[in-house]
Image (spheres, helix red, strand yellow):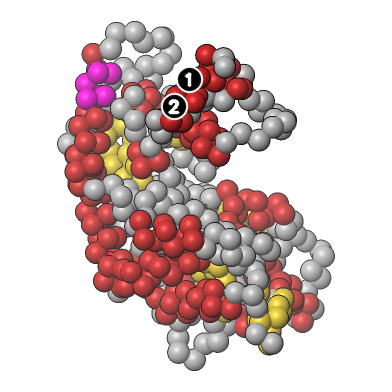
Amino acid sequence: MSEKKQRKELCRDHFLEEYFEMDEEDTLLPQDHLYEAPIPAEVAYRIISDELLDEGSARMNLSTFCTTEMDPEGTRLMAQTLEKNAIDKSEYPQTAAIEQRCVNILANLWHIPQNETFLGTSTVGSSEACMLGGMAMKFRWRNNAKAHGLDVNARRPNLVISSGYQVCWEKFCVYWDIEMRTVPMDAAHLSLNLDTVMDKVDEYTIGIVGIMGITYTGKYDDLAGLDAKVEDYNAAHPDFPVYIHVDGASGGFFAPFVDPGFSWDFRLKNVVSINTSGHKYGLVYPGVGWVIWRNEACLPDELIFRVSYLGGELPTMAINFSRSASQIIGQYYNFVRFGFNGYQAIQKRTRRVAMTLSRALADTGLFDMINDGSNLPIVCWTFKKDARVKWNLYDLADRVRMHGWQVPAYPLPKNMDQIIIQRIVVRADLSRELGELLIRDITTAIDELNHAHILTEGFTDTSSNGAYGFTH
Ligand SMILES: Cc1ncc(COP(=O)(O)O)c(C=O)c1O
């Protein structure tokens, strides 16, 4: 017996079989084509989990809004339901019922009036949900425009949104051949500018998108103010009314718990649809989103497909067909587990952590806080005009990365892109204690940068775009 085989036998005997003790251990597995032979499951597991090691800890990735920690029980339930296909409504009727319960819970959380016949669906995330919201607005606009004799082919329809939009809206406009009319943000308007928004609207406008939590800064658009403007516009243009879709990717799961009295949802008459990401402040692992329409008039029938369900029919309107139902189950688990008060307690704590971090950063004396975490728990800052330092926010991001944290720096959107900001997305799993460690690491990094000597010329400008960035 070869020495290697003997060693293997010995290990086996002692229940100590090592990983990588396979004949191929000295061979690098091919990456771009299949290896011929199967390998033991535990070796495959080890190879791949090792390969992912250098990505660090997802919980220390403070650039993502997506959930990075769930209860073990919720995770177990999701693992247990991975094999269920959410689209197979008749095969998994209870899962379909659970999805419908989630839709109902969200519609009620967003104050759907009692007399409305709302509809909704789960999606892969907010991107798919926004796509559906946009499509519904386009179809509704076209039906109405035709009915009122407008030549729908004379011009491209348009969508009005603040320039702080998330990229999914740009995709929507490209895919559906819509002109995107952006309302520029400026220093005085870091969310939708209500003074100019209605100047962009005409009979070819399919709708206005209000954002509950601008991705860049965490600021909310003033939805109540927008609703009032839209109300006036519609009174003056009864044949070509416009409506509002709320992109509540983050805020849709945050505002109802933290600011229950704040009207941004179906309480506003002209809000016809709302999307949110279950995998952001809905506290489920990625990929689940939701979209809800106020009533059937807001979701033209052409967009509803019917699948068989328990001998009857169930409407589906999602773009995607097959996907695991586990995220839907995970969402329902959170609803059952936390209830309103649990979600509220979690979100309020998250906000307190954000505001504490914000105060600590302001105390350095170097930064102007753009968002202090008091609406969405997003902390973002830029340098004070008179900050006298020889490093920029990209350097700080790099330095903090050495401690394991990812705190990205990036430019604001077009026409404000000379302003570089840095952002921390505070999530439920960033505890007060972890927050203290983060502040310690940021202040240490600042101290290190202040005492560093090498600085390449041209890299001392705090407003520099640097050589790399972070896109939304
Ligand atoms: C405002 C906004 N809309 C849409 C999206 C896209 O969401 P998802 O990642 O769930 O597709 C995001 C993601 O950050 C967002 O912040």
The residue at the point 34 percent across, 30 percent down is: 404
Instruction: Read off the residue under disc 1.
Output: 7
Instruction: Read off the residue under disc 2.
Output: 11
- Most foreground residue, 443 or 229: 443
The residue at the point 50 percent across, 19 percent down is: 6
Q: Position of residue 230 (x, y in %)?
A: 52, 73
Q: Residues within 10 Å of mark 1 (few under 14, many from 20)?
A: some
Q: Is residue 171 visible?
A: yes
Q: Position of residue 146 (x, y in %)?
A: 78, 77
Name, please, the residue furthest toward the bottom: 115
* Magenta region includes residue 50: no
Q: Quadrant of residue 245?
A: bottom right
Q: Position of residue 357 (x, y in %)?
A: 23, 43
- Most foreground residue, 134 or 387: 134
Cβ–Cβ under 8 Å for marks 2 and 1: yes
34 left or right, relative to 5: right
Q: Which residues are magenta?
A: 444-450
Q: Is residue 372 visible?
A: no
